[in-house]
Image (tube, coloured by chain):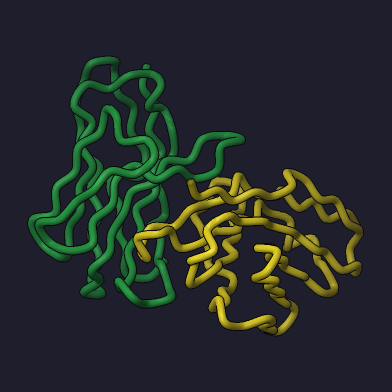
Chain colours: A green, B yellow
């Protein structure tokens, strides 16, 4: 997990609250992405970015916003948290044409 | 669309070989990956294979790729109890950047 830092590691939210999961990488990677992991569902892509100023939706984007104002940072925003967003969230980064994708250590989010 | 499928469970005895299988649908995939996840932990990249290769060996790990059948396998030789984890197969998506994951295979190793 070298070089990809996620914060916070654990968070409990009330329904309707907003929050931002932070992700930063220091490897000058073009590509960054957010996944959520739920039991029996594997990892599902939420949003991804192929460079600063460019973002796109993945498989499960609803309820989440992202932005990529710098190469290093790719925050994930929950505007109005719902219990269905209780999950483990992983940020990842890699070179656009490279072969290695690095993952952060995960953020455990509970919405009550 | 793109899809990656894996069997959900595999149980082996310590010292045996484990083979975890995966099928994918995107014939334009350039890289295919195996990740390991231990309980409560993040994802650890075990190995990857480029799509123009048939086989890759890395110590106890052997990856076989059958591009015609879109079938990928991970063989772990001399499986140890420390190998117990969830193993995810993943492919690079059509964009060439996003990873598409299977649901994971839970490997249970008994002594």
Q: Is residue B31 left or right of residue A57?
A: right
- Residue B78 occupies quadrant: bottom right
Q: Is residue B22 left or right of residue A73?
A: right
- The relative height of residue A2 versus residue B41 in the rendered view (above or below) is below
Position of the C terminus of chain B by quadrant: bottom right
Q: Is residue B33 left or right of residue B12?
A: left
- The relative height of residue B7 versus residue A29 in the rendered view (above or below) is above
Residue B99, position as x, y percentages in the image: 44, 57
The residue under the point 32% across, 19% down is A82
The residue under the point 58% across, 74% down is B47
Residue A103, position as x, y percentages in the image: 40, 60
- Residue A97 occupies quadrant: bottom left
Front-most of B37 and B5?
A: B5
Count of labels shown?
0
The residue under the point 57% across, 82% down is B52
- Residue A83 occupies quadrant: top left
The residue under the point 83% across, 55% down is B109
Residue B6, position as x, y percentages in the image: 69, 50
Residue B29, position as x, y percentages in the image: 49, 66
């Amino acid at each position: 997990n070298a070089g990809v830092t996620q914060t916070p590691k654990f968070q409990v939210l009330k329904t309707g609250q907003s929050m931002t999961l932070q992700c930063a990488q220091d490897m000058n990677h073009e590509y960054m992405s957010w996944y959520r992991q739920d039991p029996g569902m594997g990892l599902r892509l939420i949003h991804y970015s192929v460079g600063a100023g460019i973002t796109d939706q993945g498989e499960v984007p609803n309820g989440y916003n992202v932005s990529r104002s710098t190469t290093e940072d790719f925050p994930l925003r929950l505007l109005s948290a719902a219990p269905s967003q209780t999950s483990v969230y992983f940020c990842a980064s890699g070179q656009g044409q490279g072969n290695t994708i690095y993952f952060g250590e995960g953020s455990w989010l509970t919405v009550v | 669309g793109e899809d990656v499928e894996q069997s959900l469970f595999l149980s082996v005895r310590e010292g045996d070989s484990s083979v975890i299988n995966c099928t994918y649908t995107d014939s334009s995939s350039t890289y295919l990956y195996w990740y390991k996840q231990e309980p409560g932990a993040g994802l650890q990249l075990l190995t990857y294979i480029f799509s123009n290769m048939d086989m890759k060996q890395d110590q106890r790990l052997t990856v076989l790729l059958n591009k015609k059948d879109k079938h990928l396998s991970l063989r772990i030789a001399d499986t140890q109890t420390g190998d117990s984890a969830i193993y995810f197969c993943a492919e690079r998506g059509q964009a060439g950047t996003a990873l598409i994951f299977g649901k994971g295979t839970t490997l249970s190793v008994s002594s």
